Image: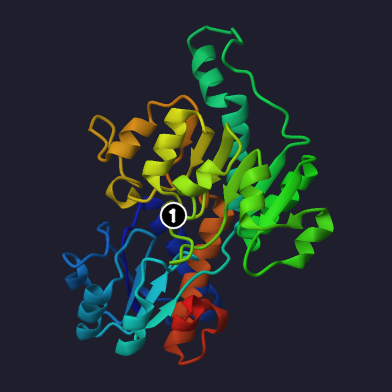
Amino acid sequence: MRVAIFSTKPYDKRFFDEANQRLIDNGGPSAGHEIGYFESRLTVESVSIAFGIPAVCVFTNDEVDPQVLSMLSGGGTKLVALRCAGFNNTNLAEAARLGITIARVPAYSPNAVAEHTIGLMLALNRKFYRAHTRVREGSFELEGLLGFNLHGKTVGVIGTGRIGAIVSQILTGFGCRVLLNDPRPNQSITNYGAEYVALDTLFNESDVITLHCPLTPETNHIINHEALSKTKRGVMLVNTSRGALIDPAAALDALKAGQLGFLGLDIYEEESDFFFHDLSGKVIPGEFSSQLMTFPNALITGHQAFFTTEAMTAIAETTLNNLTTFERGEPLGLNEVTIDMIR
């Protein structure tokens, strides 16, 4: 099947080429796909690249809005393959109206994101990034590097899907008290000693709060001024899920006031303007992002939580398998995204 892959980086091409070659090795030349790689994001301006191509493959910062979908449909595209789990950048209602199938990779490596989340907690708490800079400059003093034991602390986990469940399990292993919140409780997590509580209780009692819920109208800016006013002073907040779960103005105000003691982000609401690009030597756009980088208790990584060999392999293989399944006219099962998922 012909597919146009947008937002391509060298590592994307490497893993997709390897996965495609495995398909060919296992099933012959007809088992592989004809892949076109394009560095540009999918937008109204770039959508013409895909005209005449039956499938496009997109990532988190590509735009799959009604206008783009309409143009894709007019150009003959029948499948949009998301190489990620989230689908908040895709207008599912318009896709359904146009008869465009949306596929995704629902679980490429929850361990990768969960482990990165724990890494952010540890780095923020024990200030690894500051210590590394000091030692490289020949300073070995400890002033300003004081942390706290995670053991015995209360950690609130908002969203207990695959990633949130793994984070909860790891934290119970640290000896933390783990509070959970999710409209669809996963009772298996409580076997590790974690407990489901109301959101206000989680805000009130947590020393650390970590976000692992999807972005929906209900969770948009779930962390806002009101929510932060309910937390302990000096709370740590970590987000490796979706940027718009946090109101950036509220987070910035809470950092300035000391209500937020630590902030760890792997994603950001307006990240499409600069994440995945080398902007060294340039002015980073956005008031929030530029101010955030001045705080010693804030740590940002560039949407890399998913970025492991295992995850990239799973993303490429599942995406190409979705193409194969669609081309054969077979049901995509849980890998298909439908409008019912957000109702």
Which sits in the foreground, 145 or 201? Answer: 201
* 233 lies left or right of 283: right
Q: Which residue is drawn at 36% across and 82% down?
A: 93
Is residue 31 at all visible to an observer of this figure? no
Q: Quadrant of the N terminus?
A: bottom left
- The amino acid sitting under disc 1 is His
Q: How many numbered discs, if any?
A: 1
Residue 68 horizontal side relative to residue 91, left or right = left
Where residue 153 sits: x, y (%)?
A: 73, 37
Q: How crowded is mark 1: few (under 14 residues within 10 Å), some or many (20 or more)?
A: some
As drawn, is 19 to the left or to the right of 149?
Answer: left
Q: Residue 342, position in %: x, y? A: 47, 76
Q: Which colour scheme is used?
A: rainbow
Relative to the observer, which residue lies in front, 286 or 137? 286
**Picture residue at 38% right of the left edge, 33% below the top:** 292
Q: In this view, does 170 lie above or below 198?
A: above
Q: Is 3 placed above or below 42 here?
A: below
Please name the residue that numbered disc 1 is placed on: 221
Helix, strand, or loop for circle 1? loop
On the image, the x and y values in percent for residue 283 come to 23, 33
Q: Does any portion of residue 254 appear in the rendered image? A: yes
Q: Quadrant of residue 165?
A: bottom right
The image quarter in which residue 69 lies: bottom left
Rendered residue at 73%/45% (across/down): 171
Q: Does residue 121 appear to the left or right of 240 in the view shown? A: right
Relative to 65, say whether 16 is above or below. Answer: above
Q: Residue at x 65, y 70 (%)?
A: 184
Q: Answer with the quarter of the image where residue 107 lies.
A: bottom right
Question: Can you give x and y, in whole percent of width and height, for residue 36 in the image?
Answer: 30, 68
